[in-house]
Amino acid sequence: MPEYLKLAVAAIRAAYGDYTGLVLKTAKHLPKIITLIIAILILIIIVPATFFKSIFSLSNNQTMFPIACQYKSSFSNDFGTGRVNDGQNEKHEGIDIFADRNTPILAVQDCKIIKIGWNGLGGWRILLESTDGLKEYYYAHMENYSSDLQKYKDFSGMVCENPGISVKVGEIIGYVGSSGGFYSNSPTRTDMGTSPHIHFQMWEKGKTTSGSYSENLINPYYFLKNLHDKNK
């Protein structure tokens, strides 16, 4: 087989897999000049288009562990374990990721900010929604927000909803801490007194068969583990 056709077949195999057999069978019955033209078209049109499509797909759906890989962190599957909030026994609705105080916290995906400000239980927190509208991410117990978000660290306790701010995957949104308390009315500046960590919570959103939209709290442990292992 001519080298140019080998190159074209390898390229189309990378792009489309199972169609290589058809290319080879067709090539046997065509003059060399036609197979050369086909090979050139594959190399200059089909492969680049497929390549760029994959690049744009990656940028739109890329995800990243909320603590950069150069910083030490630890977490376990503590979703559903017992908690006491407002004097009531409850279940942990997220995963705690432990890291040194003031370790940068990253946006796990391209998102827009849905809510930011103080919460008695969550301390300085941020609620994000992915740009595709399919997921929500909640970060709590921050020590501080990023410099771009500092104005939302309002000690009067004011909360801002839908401020019209977008964040990119991997962008620093805050820093690990232990803000918040065990009561919904805990005032600003309250510290939990625990080891510094972020509480990471996650919802999946979608359309039901009836046409309404659902929002389901999920255990984010395996999502986080996959990101952690991938970003090592």
Image (spheres, rainbow, N blue to C red):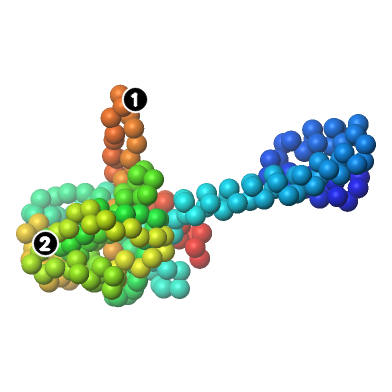
- Residue 38 position, x and y percent, is 81, 41
Instruction: Name above or below for residue 33 compared with residue 120.
Output: above
Is 225 on the left-hand or right-hand side of 113? Answer: right
- SS for dot 2: loop
Is 109 on the left-hand or right-hand side of 231? Answer: left
Instruction: Name above or below for residue 97 compared with residue 23.
Output: below
Q: Name the residue: 79% across, 33% down.
A: 22
**What amino acid type should be assigned to the residue bearing mark 2?**
Met
Task: Say which mark, if any, is on residue 209.
Answer: 1
Q: Residues within 10 Å of mark 2 (few under 14, many from 20)?
A: few
Mark sitting earlier along the chain (1/2)? 2
**Residue 142 in view, yes or no:** yes
Task: Say which mark, if any, is on residue 158.
Answer: 2
Q: Which image quarter: residue 138?
A: bottom left
- SS for dot 1: loop
Is 123 on the left-hand or right-hand side of 217? Answer: left
- Most foreground residue, 212 or 27: 27
Q: Residues within 10 Å of mark 1 (few under 14, many from 20)?
A: few
- Most foreground residue, 70 or 211: 211
Q: Which image quarter: residue 13?
A: top right
Q: Are marks 1 and 2 in contact (CB under 8 Å)?
A: no
Q: Name the residue: 85% across, 32% down.
A: 26
**Residue 66 in view, yes or no:** no
Q: Name the residue: 28% across, 73% down.
A: 147
Q: Quadrant of the N terminus?
A: top right
- Most foreground residue, 156 or 40: 40
Give the Cα distance between marks 1 and 2. 38 Å
**What amino acid type should be assigned to the residue bearing mark 1?**
Thr
